Amino acid sequence: MTVLVVGASRGIGHEFARQWRAEGARVVATARDEAGLARLRELGCEALPLDVTDAASVAGLGWRLDGERFATVVVNAGVYGPRADGLEAPSAADFDTVMHTNVLGPMRVLPALQDLLAPDARVAVLSSIMGSIGGRTSPGGWLYRASKAALNSVLKDVALTWAARGVVCVAVHPGWVQTDMGGPGATLTPERSVADLRRLLSRLQPADNGGFFNHDGHPIPW
Ligand code: NDP
């Protein structure tokens, strides 16, 4: 099995790469600096440099798949941005960083993968329950929330576009995970979250295409 993890230098993305390598999968994984690439090579991944905010970086990806296609793709790269609890307007720079990473990045990366996917490939974007509008009961982190809600819309268009090919695309919430982003007080280890997400991906059916799922498999309201 050949898989791709976009944004795998650390945290949840790195754990996806680690678990798939431990199972013997061929793992193509990206990082945006040499230290991250070195960590991926240590796992036995094929490490590619990629900054999703840089169009030239996406266009210049040196895929060497030797006729193989990705069975599973995880688009994981993401940033939280400023930790604002109120309605403080973000700076233009913070807005651009969060939206370019979390929304424009997947809008560049996903189309670039179109011809590299196996006919029945599974594609997941790392969204967040914070992007859910229907399920929201309290405010906070509104720039990050807006970016993940926008990402969910992007995922839906990709899912509808590729549906006829048999590809199943989903947005997933990994839980609250102990990473640099989630912090040490988070409830889930990366190992647990990624094990759950890999199980979810392995069980996806065509009817799940375009869905938004918690790591435990339960649907999340848009
Ligand atoms: P981390 O902050 O630990 O890791 C983020 C990853 O994204 C790093 O590998 C980072 O690379 C990469 N990244 C950031 N910006 C870019 C960029 N411009 N181009 C390429 N890669 C980039 O986050 P997590 O592992 O916790 O989160 C992973 C995903 O899961 C994110 O999309 C996040 O929003 C989502 N998520 C996480 C939750 C949690 O509790 N942790 C909860 C809900 C969702 P680098 O090392 O170069 O910075």
Image (cartoon, rainbow, N blue to C red):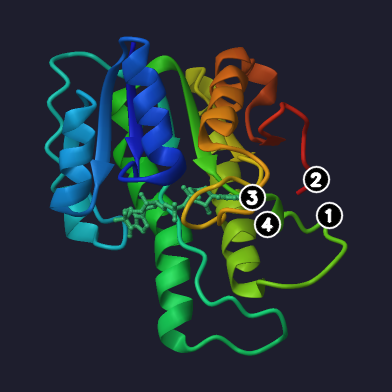
Residue that mark 3 sits on: 186
> Is the CB atom of the residue marked by disc 1 within 8 angstroms of ligand 1's nearest atom?
no
Upstream in sequence: badge 1 or badge 3 = 1
Residue at coordinates 29% horizontally, 28% vertically from top-left? 115
**Image quarter (top left, top right, bottom left or bottom right) of the N terminus:** top left
| Label pair 1/4, CB-CB below 8 angstroms | no
In terms of sequence position, does the residue under pointer 2 or pointer 3 come before the other?
3
Q: Is mark 3 within 8 Å of ligand 1?
A: yes
Where 184 sits versus 30, above or below? below
Q: How many angstroms separate mark 4 from mark 3 (CA)? A: 18 Å
Amino acid type, callout 2: Pro
Q: How many marks?
A: 4
Considering only vertical position in the picture, is 188 above or below 91? above
Percent position (x, y) of residue 122? 49, 23
The Cα–Cα distance between marks 1 and 3, rounded to whole angstroms, is: 23 Å
| Residue pictured at 71% horizontal, 86% vertical | 87
Instruction: Tell me the amino acid under the disc marked 4.
Output: Gly
Secondary structure of the residue carrying tag 3 is loop
Q: Mark yes or no: residue 75 visible.
A: no
Nearer to the camera, 63 or 94: 94
Measured from the top left, where is residue 112 in percent x and y?
Answer: 29, 41
Identify the residue shown where x is 52% and y is 36%.
Answer: 190
Compute the Cα span from label 1 to label 4.
Answer: 9 Å
**Residue 153 or residue 101, whichever sits in front:** 101
| Real-space Cα separation, disc 2 to disc 1, in angstroms | 5 Å
Counting from the top left corner in percent of width and height, residue 208 is at 68, 24
Q: Residues within 10 Å of mark 1 (few under 14, many from 20)?
A: few
Specify the amino acid type for callout 1: Gly
- Residue named by callout 1: 134
Checking the image for residue 131, the label placed there is 4
The residue that disc 2 covers is 221
